[in-house]
Image (cartoon, rainbow, N blue to C red):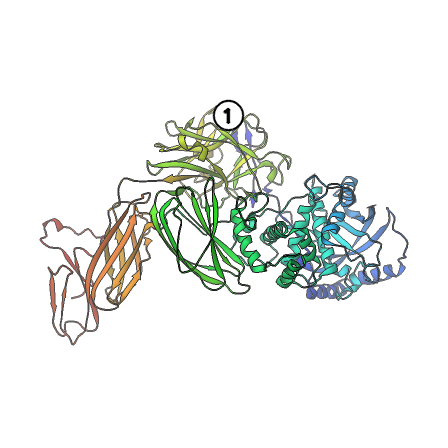
Amino acid sequence: MICLLLSVALGRIAWTQDVAPATLAGSARCGTSLINDEKLIREAWLRTQVESPGIVESMRQLSLKKGARELMVGDQHVFWVFNIEKSKFDTVRAELMAQGTLSYVWVALQEMANNHVTMDEVNAILTALEHSTSSSSLDSTKGILEIDRQVFGNPPNIDANFEKGKGDGKTHFLICDIQDGWTGTGGFVIGFFYSVDVDPTSGAVSTSNRRDMLYIDSYPGIYLNGKRRTRDALSTLSHEFQHLIHWNYDPHEVTFFNEGLSEYSEHLCGFGLRSSAGYLANTNVTLMNWNNTLDDYSRAALWTLYVAEQYGLTFITNLTQNKSTGVRGFELALGQSGYSATFAATLGNFFTANWVVSGAVDPAYRYRGLLGSRPTLTGDYSDPNVLRTDTLRQQAAQYIAFSNAKDFRITFTLPTGVSVRAVESGPTAIRVRDVAGGTVFTSPELGTLYRSVVFVAMNTHPTASGIYSYSGSGELVMFTAEEKYDDGMPDPYSQYAPYIGFGNTRTTLGMAVRFQPAVKGNVLRKARLFVAFNQEFSNGTALPGDDKDFNLHVWGDDNGKPGADIIPPFLVKVNRDKYPLGSFVDVDLTPYASSLTNLAGPIYVGFMEDEDDTVGTYMAIDNTTSDDYSFIYRGPNHPVAPSRWQTLREVSALNNHQFDGYNLMMRAVFEYSDSSHAPTLALGFLQNPILSEFIEVVAASSDELRPGSLSGMLTQPSGATQLRFMNIPGTMRAFIDTSQQLLGGGTISIRVRAAKRYGIFYRDTLAAFNARLLKREESAVVSTPSGQVVLTIEVGAVRGPLYVTAFDGISNPLARPDGLSHALKVFSIGPPGTD
């Protein structure tokens, strides 16, 4: 995502013309799985021979001149390096800048010359490789190489003839600018292990460097825009070293397991685990599938953390060194480690633990620490009356939540391979139960001991997806509604600018958005803000480790603008593991529920840049809603509106109207409970005048209805079908099902149940009409259900088969014919337009 930084001039938001469009930080990834493909390697070697025959011959002659003398700091060598962008081999001249007992550190001459790499980075890398790691590592007195060897095993240690165990026992690390097509934005390859260097059967031996070797990116991996990121390089070293070790034992391991172990290596060496948020945002993906996306790495990292915590480091060693691949290798490693568990059982427990995280009695359902985020819910229901069908991919899971319901009952229909667990959670208790398919599951304590029940639907089948369904029922107590003015995606107000902000050290300035609670019975439970911070922009000046926080306020109304604080403002520290950049940050307001209940007038949610806040906070903007609900607070030095709130439209007038039609991306989450009364409800149908067997069922009300509350059945002598309503565009007072068809004559009933848009009481309404299939050669009698109107039809009255319908009253509840107040009897005969 691209954005333009805004700064303050005399307390006024302004577009600073001399600031170039800035980009949010790119994402680094490992290139090992991307380039270690036998066909790709062969094609790259052929391309190199054709396009660069001179380089090939020069490298051949150079290799003939090499001696076997011991390497010394200051030596220079020319190395083959795979060019990912062009899928060919380049040559890079590098100098040996440092060495230890287990490693050599080489740096490309060009990267030393342009100052992308200095001796500071080289020394830091050698120290971390050989001597010590952070206090959060497995053993801070050991370097990365020793920790990885202890847990995973030994690297191949080849000599120039590719003989394992015959090398000098050291691994070569080449720091260079990896050519991956990076253009200044987006993701890039930060490092890789290339099997060509150690594998005599690779098909490209002529481009092999014939040594244990790993590659680390210098730009932008270490250096970017004047900033150095040695920590990222160090975590990559541990990641790639595991790949080298793994190749020594199991060169054909499936990518998912191999990358997961490399991700876990970063964790063991003290660099933390990749955020689980990428995977947990969409868990309906095949566990072991690999498309080389960041979400794949997120999934592999979390899986490996889970199995390591469940089965220990001995299992991790056995998994790395077992020569069998995939699920078979996994289960053999379990047996070697003294466990009788299966891969499928482990997978089911993993899916469960991803929701439970901690607190469960059974350790199989929990982690040792917090994950920072939970799986995205496929369904989040406060209204328990639900009927839904979903498809689960193989080795995947979905999560369905119910809350605030009484007398809750649910039945799952499950195919082979799909199972369900229920996780019932409350402030003081948590319970995990298996759910049997085809039987009614109840949670009597839901709403008392437990606040919610989350169903974990799991498909552990290795190859087949599964279609499952569930039907829930119960009494709605209250439900949650998210009030918003955006569609979830920021919209640039200029070519590259979806954020606005004040810059660093800009105090007593703020932003807010107005919300009007829909009904009197409400509680403001959560605020959601789509924020970024100065250091998260490529041209930001704040340091990467600076705080990412803001002071949240909830204000009352003062003549259409934010007024006094309703609750004391408080500091919100943003955890990017839990709320990744480019997502909403959720702020729980439950502790302030007593002050945020039954809010009557408009309220305002937002933040202030207070005195001790030195890092600029930026808000995303969106143009989904053109009406202006957003406000900017001017500081005391503003020349026109000192210490006053202005609408974003007023601010826009001072900035060439570039914010017209935009709103800040803040949201308010309310619990609503409208207990006034059930809605009015009128039922009817529209009959097709040409294809008379097709009807559209209509439900209408003088009240706004909640879409999820509508359910119903159309019952004919031949059977019943479920009604599936959608709202008629432009209104929440009328809903229609366009899919129904008459299947014979007789009395047809329509039964519909619905609640007001924010209501907890339901109206259950029944309507009926008679239908008769007429034929040209037959006479017929059709009456309304009450029998008060009877229609006699003679032979030959119709040209062909035709359904005639009779209804007491007006069959179309949306119609308002004139003169009905004077009618003695009202009835409807269909189809319309029939003589």
Q: Residue at x 17, y 75 (%)?
A: 776
* Number of numbered tags placed on the structure image: 1
Does residue 647 show up?
A: no
Answer with the quarter of the image where residue 779 lies: bottom left
Residue 392 shown left or right of residue 799 in the figure: right
Tell me what residue is drawn at x 57 percent, y 29 percent: 613
Write the residue at 48% across / 58% down.
419
Q: Secondary structure at mark 1?
A: loop
Crowding at label 1, few (<14), some or many (≥20) Cα neighbours within 10 Å? many
User: As rendered, which of 245 and 331 lies closer to the eye?
Assistant: 331
Image x and y of residue 378, in percent: 46, 52
Instruction: Say which quadrant the C terminus sits in.
Output: bottom left
What residue is at 84 percent from the left and 57 percent from the top? 167
Q: Is residue 395 left or right of residue 807?
A: right
Query: Horizontal and vertical percent for residue 739?
Result: 31, 62
Above or below — where is 286 with respect to 525? below
Q: Is residue 266 visible?
A: yes
Quadrant of the image occupied by residue 38 = bottom right
The image position of residue 222, as x and y in percent, is 71, 44
Residue marked by disc 1: 635
On screen, residue 612 above or below 311: above
Q: Amino acid at mark 1?
A: Gly
